[in-house]
Structures are given as structure tokens and as C-alpha cells.
Image (cartoon, grey):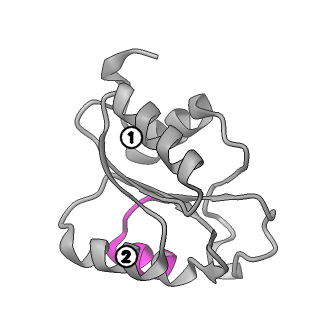
Amino acid sequence: MTVETLAGLAILVVEDDYFIADELASSLSRAGAQVVGPVGALSDALALLDETDHLDFVILDLNLDGESAIPIADALAARNAPFAFVTGYGSSGIPPRFKTVKRLDKPVEIARVVSLIKKGTGSST
């Protein structure tokens, strides 16, 4: 993947597993993204959303240390911010209103994440 792949895109990573969050953040940075976070708690993610004016895409773990990330998804939907769920639990915890949101199963492959972000942001670089 070239450095320019996600150049200039602000990507928020919401993931409670330190190693997954670190790998996602590092890989996205290497692809040229401006990584926001990562954050691993519901309250921290909601606070960061309140403080952040612009996000191009959000990678959202569905389960944050036992708490549902659906309030974050609701906030993102209200902002019309593109996002995708990352989960190890399948689609069972996703409410019907979010059934059209893309979902990546853990373990995630960074190439799939980059491709999904490019499609979700309309980036063709």
C-alpha cells in the first residue's frame, strides 16, 4: 500500500483492544491517514466526537469493554459521518437501523479496512 492511499483523511479508530487499536492506527498512519484516537471507551469516544469538527471515516468496534457502541453509531449517523463496525460477534448486536452499515469481522485485514475507507469516502487515490 502506498503512503498516499489515505492521504489527508481523518480516520477515528474506536477499539478497546490495545493491540488491535495500535495495529489499526499504525497501519492507517502508514497509509497516509490522519488518525484520530484511538479511543477504547464509550464515554471517551463520545467526548472526542463532541470535540472533533470533521471526520472522514470511523472504524467502530461494536463492543467496547462490555458496553455497546451503538450510542456512538447514533451520533455518527446524526453527523452523516461514514463508519464501519468491527466486531468479533457477528451482526447479532447491530440494530436493524444499522443493517446497511458495513461490518468487518475480527481479526481485520488492513487491506480490507483501507478498501472500505476508500469506498466510504469516495477517495480514488
From the viewer's perspective, is residue 73 above or below residue 33? Answer: below
What residue appears at the point 46 percent right and 32 percent down from the top-left corner? Answer: 27
**Residue 98 lies in what quarter of the image?**
bottom right
Q: Does 7 sit left or right of 122 as displayed?
A: left
The mark that comes first in sequence, 2 or 1, is 2
Question: Front-most of 15 and 7?
Answer: 15
Q: Give the range drawn in magenta.
A: 73-82
Residue 11 pos. (x, y %): 35, 49
Amino acid carrying label 1: it is Gly
What residue appears at the point 28 percent right and 41 percent down from the top-left corner? Answer: 9
From the viewer's perspective, is residue 99 above or below residue 36? Answer: below
- Decide whether the magenta segment is chiefly helix, strand or loop: helix
Q: Is mark 2 on a helix, strand or loop?
A: helix
Which residue lies under the disc numbered 1? 122
User: Circle 1: is it few (<14), some (14-19), or many (20+) Cα within 10 Å?
Assistant: few
Q: Does 46 sit left or right of 10 as displayed?
A: right
Which residue lies under the disc numbered 2? 44
